[in-house]
Amino acid sequence: MTSVRLGQEVLGESGKERLEALRSAPVTVLQIGEGNFLRGFVDLMLYESRKKGIYTGSVAVVQPRPGGKPKIEALAEQDGLYTVVVRGLEAGKPVERKEVVEIFGRVFDPYSNWETFLDIAKGPELRVVVSNTTEAGIAYRPEALVDGQPAVSYPGKLTQLLYARYLAFDGDKTRGLYIFPCELLERNGDALKECVLHYCKDWDLPEAFVQWVLEHNRFLNSLVDRIVTGYPDEAQAEAWFKEWGYRDPMLTTAEPYHLWVIEGEPELENVLPLVRSGLNVHWVEELKPYQQRKVRILNGAHTLMALVGLVHGLKEVRETMEHPEWGALVKRTIGQEIIPSLPYDKQELESYAEEVAGRFLNPFIRHRLSDIAMNSLSKFKTRLLPSIAFYYENDLPDGLLHGLAGLLRYYKIASGEDGFEGHDLNGERYIVKDDAVLLETIAEVWAAAEGQHQPLQETLRKLLALEQLWGVDLNASAPGLAEAAANLIAQWEETDHEQRS
Ligand SMILES: NC(=O)c1ccc[n+]([C@@H]2O[C@H](COP(=O)([O-])OP(=O)(O)OC[C@H]3O[C@@H](n4cnc5c(N)ncnc54)[C@H](O)[C@@H]3O)[C@@H](O)[C@H]2O)c1
Ligand SMILES: O=P(O)(O)OC[C@@H](O)[C@@H](O)[C@H](O)[C@H](O)CO
């Protein structure tokens, strides 16, 4: 077992020289987010581009929340280096590529180095901000502007950054930034801009600044697509560390497939030269078709299989896809229920769905259902509910009904020592990670039902009435859902009980 930690020493003399060059390159990209996704996606792309001599700048990275400090410190201890293993099938052939990514010229904690953050914001060479703060990160919550301190929220910090830049360049219209949020939100750029404008208003920032934000900065809407599965299981990590001769707690794994669709003109290659670098990036006029296709097919199927799979004791994506009953259910739901609900070319959707099914079967990637299930309440609403809504006038088809029943059964929870806990059909305990207020509300419904020995259908009816979960009273939108879901859950309980005894 090696105790050597990744750092510039591991790269040898030529590596040290490359790192020196990287650190003296201008910071053209400021990255808000130290998470796995950005490191396995944007940073890896920029690194590919830099290796080809096309992108010549460097990236400064900070964490968006105080809680991310240990990861930022770990990256800094490794001289900004980290390993990505890209593995999967390419044209049907297995590939496994390891890269030590050299892209971060600066790595720091903005909470203890706020002045450094603002200095980077004022850098003449800075052109781009990228972020991934999860869907929860792009949200407006009123907060005070405190001089010399970072705002709590990401959009708040971005407002501070833009204001510092505006003041430093005296409103120069050529100094605006290109902002690329990578959060999986519909029209993520517009959503981020709205939050920034809210803070401008709350903080009474000058109207001239607001005009500068609107006219000379671009908030780009984009869609990201790559399955980034983070740190592997311990046995795999140890085997790799032994083979490589160094340890890397910031190691992440990803599939070879990658797609970034950005709503913007191809001339923006001058800002981020991604297509030129041979990457699967598309500058398009209208993002919506790409967004809907991906979120409804890929993410919808993920959410469906995570909920149904976890309730039935399954743990991973591939295992679920290979399961004779649940794998077939997922494929059927995509092909016969989700695709017919989308207003786009069927052949094209089917070919995307086939590609997605192949990605789910990636033999090298162990994608945990429990990771996908995190925050399923909001994911269900954006990823599966729109497909369900297409069938409000008719009976809900079987696959989507399984998704809804899976959600309701998975969220059969009670408050426990480690958070809100549920039990799968085999009685195994799990912890549900989601919005605390919503979890509390759901747990209260289940607790009341137990106290009153309420029939399952009645409990589900109460849950389906919670507009804070679905945006509507689902009983009114689709009468009969509670009964259908209750019957299905009862059938699951019975089948699993028979199989156990
Ligand atoms: N992993 C993937 O396959 C994948 C693919 C496409 C998109 N995404 C996007 O990435 C997100 C998950 O990111 P990851 O896989 O890098 O996980 P991660 O846990 O490694 O990183 C999450 C990042 O978000 C930050 N964050 C979390 N909640 C926040 C909040 N409320 N405010 C500000 N910052 C917050 C964390 O500090 C961290 O920097 C998804 O929600 C999705 O938007 C992931
Ligand atoms: O990353 P999340 O938690 O928002 O969603 C889980 C997965 O569906 C998601 O990460 C996909 O793997 C990804 O969206 C593929 O591009």
Image (tube, grey):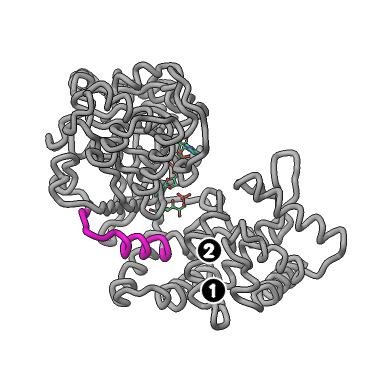
Residue located 70% across and 39% down the image: 418
Which class describes the residues within 10 Å of circle 1: few (<14), some (14-19), or many (20+)?
A: many
Which class describes the residues within 10 Å of circle 2: few (<14), some (14-19), or many (20+)?
A: many
Q: Is 481 in front, or is 171?
A: 171
Image coordinates for residue 89, horizontal then vertical, percent: 31, 56
Give, as a three-letter code, the residue at label 1: Gly
Q: Give the quarter the ligand 1 occupies.
A: top left
Which SS class for mark 1? helix
383 above or below 428?
A: below
Which residue in the protein does label 1 denote?
399
95 above or below 303?
A: above
Highlighted magenta segment, given as a residue range? 282-297
Question: What is the spatial separation of the Cα atoms under label 1 and label 2, in whole angstroms?
Answer: 9 Å
Q: Is 53 in front, or is 190?
A: 190
Which SS class for mark 2? helix
Q: Are marks 1 and 2 in contact (CB under 8 Å)?
A: yes
Residue located farthest toward the right when viewing the structure as drawn: 452
Image coordinates for residue 76, horizontal then vertical, percent: 38, 21
Which residue in the protein does label 2 denote?
304
Looking at the rendered structure, which numbered label has been put on residue 211? none
- Report if residue 238 is visible in the image: no
The image quadrant of residue 484 is bottom right
The image quadrant of residue 249 is top left
Residue 49, magenta (yes or no): no
Give, as a three-letter code, the residue at label 2: Leu
